[in-house]
Image (cartoon, rainbow, N blue to C red):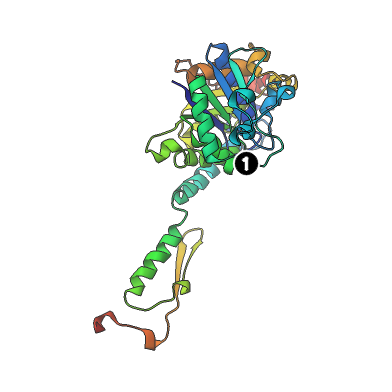
C-alpha cells in the first residue's frame, strides 16, 4: 500500500517526484544553447571585424576602440557595440570623395 | 582493413578504460587482432586493468621520441594471443605527445592490427584530441547522469569537427555506450533512461552496460571483465557491443522501462 502513489502520477518510490524528467529537460535546454555556440566560438570576433570594416569605410577608426559585447538574459540577449570615433578633424564623409 | 576506434567521453570516471579493455578482449576472443593504446600520458591505467603493469618497459612516448621501436613497446596479453597493449608513459608530460608522432604510430599499427582501440584521457586537452584525431569510429561512454551526458555531447561535437575524417568532410562513425545503467532506478524515474540519452545525444546505441560489482572485481585482479567472467551481466553486454562493432546484428537488450504491476510493486527489491 505504501507504494500506491507510484501507480499514479509517476512518483518515485520515496514519494518524491521522479527526477529523471527534470534532468532530461535541463539537458535539452542547456545543450540546445551550447550546440548553438559550437563551431562559431568567435562569432563576436567576426562581428567586431565586420563592423570595423563597414564603419572604417566612412570613418577613420582605431581598431582597438571597437568593442562588441554580448549579454545573455532570460528572455532576450543584448548585443552591445561600442565604437569610439575620433573628433571631427579626422572624420571623412564618404560623400566628400 | 584496420579500424581505428577511440573510446572517449569527456568526463572522467565513466568507464573508458574498463570499456577499452573489455571491448578489446572481446574482439580478440572473436579472432580479431587487437591493440589497445593508452593515451592517458601521466595517468596510465590500462596496463593495470589488463594486469600488465609489471611488464611495461617502453611506452607510447618512447616510440614517439624514437627511443624505442614500436615492436619493443607492444605488450602481448598473457591470456589472449590476439590482444596487445601499447602503454602510456607514466613519467612524462602529456605535451610529449605530438600530432606527427601519433600519426606515424597509428599508420604503423594499421599495418599490423585489425583494431586499434585508443583509450582517451578525460577532458578535451591535447591527449584527448590526439586520441580521437585519427579515429574511423568512436565509442562515447556515457553514464545516465546529467554531467556525463553534457560532456558526451561536447565530445560528439569535437568528433564532428576536430578529427582528420571530419576535416576531410567525412564522418567518424559514432556509437554511444551507456555504462553504469541501473534499470530499476531508470524505471522508477530516478535515472535518465536509455531513450532519454539517445534522444538528447542523437547518436546510435552500441550497448548498455549494467551497473555491476563484476566490473570492480575484474579490475581488482587485472582482467578485462569480458575475460574474468564471460557470463556476468556486464561481460555479456560488452560481448554484444563488440559483435555490433564487427557489424553483426545483435538484438539490443534494452532493459524494460515499463514494468508490470507486480514488478513495480516489488520494484525496489528487484534491483
Quarter of the N terminus of chain B within the rendering: top left
Percent position of residue B93, x then y: 67, 42
Percent position of residue B5, x then y: 51, 27
Residue at which label 1 appears = B96
Q: Tell me which residue sits at (46%, 57%) in the image.
A: A42
Of the pair A57 and B252, the residue shown nearer to us = A57
| Mark 1 secondary-structure assignment | helix
Furthest-bottom residue in view?
A: A89
Left or right, B125 with reference to A79:
right
Q: Tell me which residue sits at (42%, 86%) in the image.
A: A87
Q: In which quarter of the image is residue B170?
A: top left
Q: Quadrant of residue B270?
A: top right
Is residue B261 visible from the viewing direction of this image? Answer: no
Percent position of residue B210, x then y: 62, 23
Percent position of residue B171, x then y: 41, 34
Is residue B112 visible from the viewing direction of this image? Answer: yes
Amino acid at each position: 500500500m505504501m507504494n500506491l502513489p507510484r501507480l499514479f502520477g509517476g512518483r518515485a518510490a520515496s514519494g518524491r517526484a521522479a527526477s529523471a524528467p527534470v534532468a532530461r529537460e535541463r539537458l535539452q535546454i542547456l545543450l540546445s544553447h551550447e550546440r548553438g555556440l559550437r563551431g562559431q566560438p568567435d562569432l563576436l570576433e567576426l562581428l567586431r571585424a565586420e563592423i570595423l570594416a563597414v564603419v572604417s569605410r566612412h570613418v577613420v577608426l582605431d581598431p582597438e576602440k571597437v568593442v562588441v559585447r554580448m549579454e545573455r538574459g532570460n528572455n532576450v540577449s543584448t548585443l552591445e557595440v561600442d565604437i569610439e570615433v575620433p573628433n571631427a578633424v579626422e572624420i571623412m564623409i564618404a560623400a566628400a570623395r | 582493413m584496420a579500424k581505428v576506434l577511440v573510446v572517449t567521453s569527456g568526463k572522467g570516471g565513466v568507464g573508458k578504460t574498463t570499456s577499452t579493455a573489455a571491448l578489446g578482449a572481446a574482439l580478440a576472443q572473436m579472432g580479431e587482432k587487437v591493440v589497445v593504446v593508452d593515451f592517458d600520458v601521466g595517468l596510465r591505467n590500462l596496463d593495470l586493468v589488463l594486469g600488465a603493469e609489471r611488464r611495461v618497459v617502453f611506452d607510447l612516448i618512447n616510440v614517439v621520441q624514437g627511443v624505442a621501436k614500436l615492436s619493443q613497446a607492444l605488450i602481448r596479453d598473457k591470456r589472449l594471443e590476439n590482444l596487445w597493449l601499447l602503454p602510456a608513459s607514466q613519467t612524462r608530460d602529456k605535451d610529449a605527445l605530438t600530432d606527427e608522432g601519433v600519426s606515424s604510430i597509428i599508420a604503423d599499427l594499421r599495418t599490423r592490427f585489425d583494431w586499434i582501440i585508443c583509450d582517451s584521457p578525460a577532458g578535451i586537452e591535447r591527449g584527448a584530441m590526439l586520441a580521437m584525431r585519427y579515429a574511423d569510429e568512436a565509442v562515447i561512454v556515457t553514464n545516465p547522469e546529467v554531467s556525463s551526458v553534457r560532456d558526451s555531447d561536447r565530445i560528439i561535437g569535437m568528433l564532428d569537427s576536430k578529427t582528420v575524417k571530419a576535416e576531410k568532410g567525412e564522418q567518424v562513425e559514432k556509437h554511444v555506450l551507456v555504462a553504469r545503467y541501473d534499470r530499476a532506478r531508470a524505471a522508477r524515474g530516478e535515472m535518465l533512461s536509455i531513450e532519454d540519452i539517445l534522444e538528447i545525444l542523437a547518436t546510435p546505441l552500441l550497448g548498455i552496460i549494467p551497473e555491476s560489482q563484476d566490473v570492480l572485481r575484474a579490475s581488482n585482479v587485472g582482467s578485462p571483465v569480458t575475460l574474468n567472467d564471460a557470463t556476468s551481466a556486464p561481460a555479456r553486454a560488452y560481448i554484444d557491443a563488440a559483435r555490433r562493432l564487427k557489424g553483426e546484428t545483435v538484438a539490443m537488450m534494452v532493459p524494460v522501462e515499463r514494468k508490470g504491476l507486480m514488478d513495480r510493486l516489488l520494484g525496489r527489491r528487484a534491483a
